[in-house]
Amino acid sequence: MFSIFKEHQHNVKQIMMLARTELKKDYKGSFLGAGWALVKPLFTLFIYWFAFDVGLRAGGDIGGIPRFTFMLPGFIPWFFISDSILFGSQSIRKNRQFVVKMHFPVSNIMTFTLLAKFYVHLVLAALMVIFLCFNGYIPNAYAIQFFYYCPLMFLFFLALSWSTAPMSAFSRDFENLIKSIMTGMFWLSGIVWDTYALDIPWLRHLMLLNPINYFVNGYRKAFVSHQWFWEYPTETLVFFVEFIVIILLGIYNYNRLRKKLPDVL
């Protein structure tokens, strides 16, 4: 952990610059530029809004909250989470020039990759708040929890990338495995349904092991259901145990593999 912090110590400005460059690089030559990073999630949200609020009109409320309003605070963190997992795992392979051709702290690659996605997340979160305000969900004291869940989410998936990025650089099979499970993770996480409402007690408790649920439910607590995170102590305890495990595994895998990366790439 000390070595990772040391690698970041004198590179904060460079990481922020590279994050902006990373965001622009994917959309270079297009008229909207980095604005295209918002088009896909906004179009996805439009499809779900049209399907549930206009087309089907059969979904009903969830816990007294209109279905799309319930789903929206789940989608916003999911867009960041899915990008963090996918692009975080590919970050070293896609930026191999930093590893092979120059002396560059490898851990910084994962940081600026996720930071680029985090910028998009902040814009989407702002748009979400505006939408909720128009629908009668004015931010109140509970919304301050956003400043707890949001940075914690960034740190959790950054620590996860310390394991996934080096392992994906060694094996494309591992990278393909991550891609293949993402759709399943979407439906197993409480993005379009309420994990607290499961009728089977053991399955409801099993859902606590999915850290994505912690952030999805957390955003809902902050903006629509108006609850505090400490009202769910078991959920919080399970998450932080997992967070510590992810950090320890990330440190172990990063230190074990980083010196071999130039030869592999």
Image (cartoon, rainbow, N blue to C red):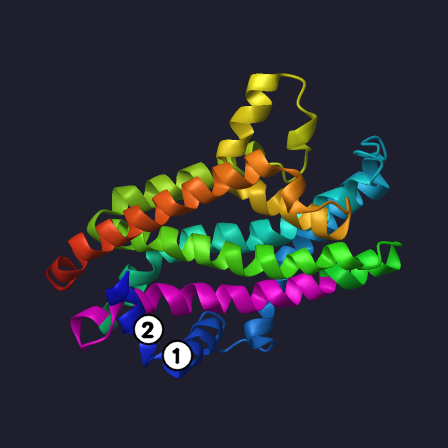
In the picture, residue 10 is in which quadrant?
bottom left
Q: Secondary structure at mark 1?
A: helix
Tell me which segment is drawn in magenta: 99-127
Residue 30: x percent and y percent? Answer: 54, 75
Give the residue at x 66% y 56%.
145
Identify the residue at image location x=25%, y=71%. Answer: 105
Question: Which residue matches tag 2?
Answer: 8
Q: From where the camera sits, is residue 130 visible?
A: yes
Question: Would you name the residue on which mark 1 appears?
Answer: 12
Crowding at dot 1, Cα within 10 Å, few <14 / some 14-19 / many 20+, comes out as some
SS of the residue under disc 2: helix
Q: Main secondary structure of the magenta part?
A: helix
Asked if residue 26 is among those painted magenta in the image, a careful observer would answer no
Q: Please state, as top left, top right, bottom left or bottom right, where the N terminus lies in the image.
A: bottom left
Question: Residue 240's spot in the image, x, y percent?
Answer: 46, 44
Residue type at mark 2: give it: His
State whether residue 37 appears in this view. no
Q: Give percent across and percent down for residue 22.
A: 43, 72
Q: Position of residue 234 (x, y in %)?
A: 56, 34
Q: Quadrant of residue 35?
A: bottom right
Nearer the observer, 5 or 22: 5
* Left-right relation of 154 to 110: right
